[in-house]
Amino acid sequence: MIKIASFICACMFVVGTLAVPVVAAEMTDQVRVSYLPPKDPDLQAVYRQLKDRRVLERLKELLSPVRLPKVLTIKLAGCEGEDDAFYGDDEIIICYEYVDELWYNMPKKTTPAGVPPFDTVVGPFVDTCLHEFAHALIDMFRLPVLGRQEDAADQMAAYIYLQLGPEESRRLVMGTAYAYLSEAKRERSTSWKKFADQHGTPAQRAFNLMCIAYGADTNLFGDLVSKGYLPKERAESCEEEYEQIQDAFETLIRPNVDQALAEKMMNRTWLRKAPKGRPSLEGSAP
């Protein structure tokens, strides 16, 4: 009887040991970056410029305050003609084709809304990088999401760069909104199947971003409403929409952020001064 009891206790100990998950220690500075040379010769200029400007290294530094449970790799790579960006298996891929497409659609001069050509590239580039980073956070921390994850990633990305200084926040919001609205104009004849996409339509994403920005700072982004870019009917609820995002971020993400390091990062200047006119690919990079 004693032997049977001992055997049962031993089995319970083994089962109990196996049932305890091994939790990796969350650490800051868990982002690794790399630039994969593209096979397409037409993308070599994009590759060289982004690498020479150390774009990913700067992104890595910006994200360093977040304590991740494992290493996250961010890569710039050729994607066989796809102008895309995506996250999976602890890895973010930003396609050179995507950056090349942004450059191709860059306006020749400052837009009527006052957006310099350079910002129409750097805005959506940063927004996309942070959008995919948001997917990584949702995955790695197993965050609950009520609604479409793509919408949550959009909101999280916008919230992060709205914590930067007012000038940089303004440049990123305006540049990204321009890119979305330009894409919407190019897709006017799109098929109904576009509405089945996991992402919102480009126009919806533009208005959502402008609403979040206005809700964050009604003075800094007040002209979005006064000049008619953001409908007044939508603007009435934007402060509440921003507060909802802020509350979710504070509850789910902020406990995993080194606050002292984050404050240091947010007080830095991250964007190069926008050059006048339409910069050439050889002359500028985000």
Image (spheres, rainbow, N blue to C red):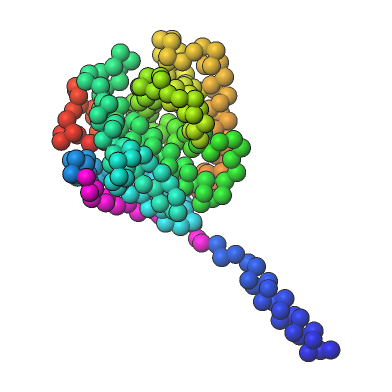
Position of residue 70 relative to residue 93, above or below, is below
Quadrant in the rendering for residue 30: bottom left
Where is residue 245? Give x, y as percent.
54, 32
In the picture, the quarter occupied by the N terminus is bottom right
Q: Is residue 129 left or right of residue 254?
A: left
246 to 188, vertically: above or below: below
What is the chief secondary structure element of the magenta stretch? loop
Left or right, 284 with respect to 231, comes to left
State the image coordinates of residue 200 (x, y, percent, origin top left).
49, 29
Tell me the magenta residue range.
24-40
Looking at the rendered image, the quarter that the C terminus falls into is top left
Q: Is residue 134 visible?
A: yes
- Does the magenta run of residues contain 38? yes
- Asked which quadrant contains residue 189, the reply is top left
Residue shown at 29% from the left, 17% from the top: 111
In front: 272, or 12?
A: 12
The percent coordinates of residue 227 (x first, y second) are: 41, 10
